[in-house]
């Protein structure tokens, strides 16, 4: 069963994404691998815009309803069945699906993991056997970016930039959430996550080929731009 799932993943996800990367690499003047990584990342981020936008909007609406939801939880804390019914009635009145922010993320996750694996392993020559017949074999993939950065090697600079943009993204998301003033676990975690995830990003990216860092940077920049647009766009 595991072998079947692994084969299915490789055929339906890994190979299409890997071939897309090589196609971009082949058609870019000078065959710049870094630009190919950026283009593939942007391609999938654009494809996910409808799902990402729904997740962001749903989360925003749920956050705005938090005071009402908490009041219901307090009122019926001894009657969990009634509490659940009242919460669902609240969401129904406000036309909100409490799971709307989760499903888009779950759908995107396999593709994002695949992009991660392709940018990590795609530089290896043995991966070229997975090219489709109509995709030109480049022979050896040059991992350079603009002729100055080897994306097959670790780069502290790229890791620092990835962590920095992750921090900006986290601060932006935190600023868009209403301030309740209460020191709940969720509020404390949200505040600490703004600093925790950039540090985690720095530690992870610094240990991996910098192609992963470029992917991370582009993803963060795209998300920052998308959040900025959605914040100004009426629901």
Image (cartoon, rainbow, N blue to C red):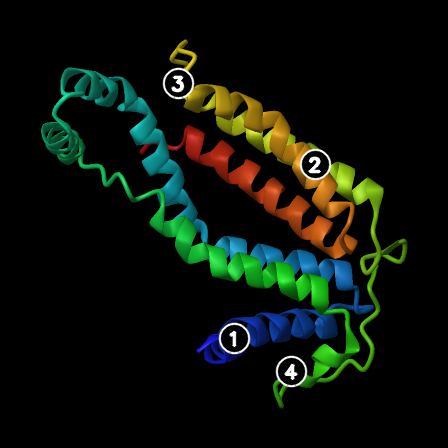
The residue lying furthest to the front in this view is 78
Label 4 and label 3: CA atoms lie apart by 48 Å
Label 1 and label 4: CA atoms lie apart by 15 Å
Task: Find residue 142 and report its horizontal and vertical position in percent.
Answer: 84, 69
Is residue 209 rendered to the left or right of residue 49? right
Label 2 and label 3: CA atoms lie apart by 25 Å
| Mark 4–mark 2 CB contact (< 8 Å) | no
Q: Kindly identify the residue that appears in the image at 49 percent across and 25 percent down.
A: 190
Residue 69 in view:
yes
Give the number of the mark in front: 1 or 3. Answer: 1
Label 2 and label 1: CA atoms lie apart by 31 Å
Question: Residue 26: which quarter of the image?
Answer: bottom right
First reached walking from the N terminus: tag 4 or tag 2: 4
Q: Which residue is mark 3?
A: 178
Q: Which residue is mark 2?
A: 163
- Seen in the picture, residue 223 relative to 37 is either above or below; the reply is above
Q: Secondary structure at mark 2?
A: helix
| Mark 2–mark 1 CB contact (< 8 Å) | no
The residue lying furthest to the top in this view is 181
Q: Kindly identify the residue that appears in the image at 72 percent across and 49 percent down.
A: 213
The residue lying furthest to the right in this view is 148
Q: Which residue is mark 1?
A: 6
Q: Count the marks.
A: 4
First reached walking from the N terminus: tag 1 or tag 4: 1
Callout 2: few (<14), some (14-19), or many (20+) C-alpha neighbours within 10 Å?
Answer: many
Give the number of the mark in front: 2 or 1. Answer: 1
Callout 4: few (<14), some (14-19), or many (20+) C-alpha neighbours within 10 Å?
Answer: some
Question: Residue 22: which quarter of the image?
Answer: bottom right
Label 1 and label 3: CA atoms lie apart by 43 Å
Residue 130 numbered mark, or none: 4
Task: Find residue 121 and report its horizontal and vertical position in percent.
Answer: 71, 67
């Amino acid at each position: 069963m595991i072998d079947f799932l692994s084969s299915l993943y490789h055929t339906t996800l890994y190979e299409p994404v890997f071939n897309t990367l090589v196609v971009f690499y082949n058609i870019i003047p000078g065959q710049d691998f870094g630009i190919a990584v950026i283009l593939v990342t942007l391609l999938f981020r654009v494809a996910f815009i409808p799902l990402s936008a729904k997740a962001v909007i749903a989360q925003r609406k749920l956050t705005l309803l938090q005071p009402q939801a908490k009041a219901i939880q307090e009122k019926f804390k001894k009657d969990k069945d009634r509490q659940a019914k009242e919460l669902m009635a609240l969401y129904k009145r406000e036309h909100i699906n409490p799971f709307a922010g989760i499903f888009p993320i779950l759908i995107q996750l396999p593709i994002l993991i695949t992009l991660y694996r392709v940018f990590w392993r795609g530089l290896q020559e043995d991966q070229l056997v997975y090219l489709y017949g109509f995709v030109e074999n480049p022979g050896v993939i040059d991992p350079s970016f603009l002729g100055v950065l080897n994306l097959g090697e670790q780069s502290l600079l790229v890791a620092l930039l990835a962590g920095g943009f992750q921090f900006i993204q986290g601060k932006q998301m935190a600023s868009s959430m209403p301030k309740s003033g209460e020191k709940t676990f969720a509020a404390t975690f949200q505040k600490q996550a703004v600093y925790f995830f950039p540090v985690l990003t720095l530690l992870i990216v610094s240990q991996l080929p910098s192609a992963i860092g470029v992917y991370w940077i582009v993803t963060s920049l795209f998300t920052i731009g998308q959040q900025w647009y959605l914040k100004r766009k009426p629901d």
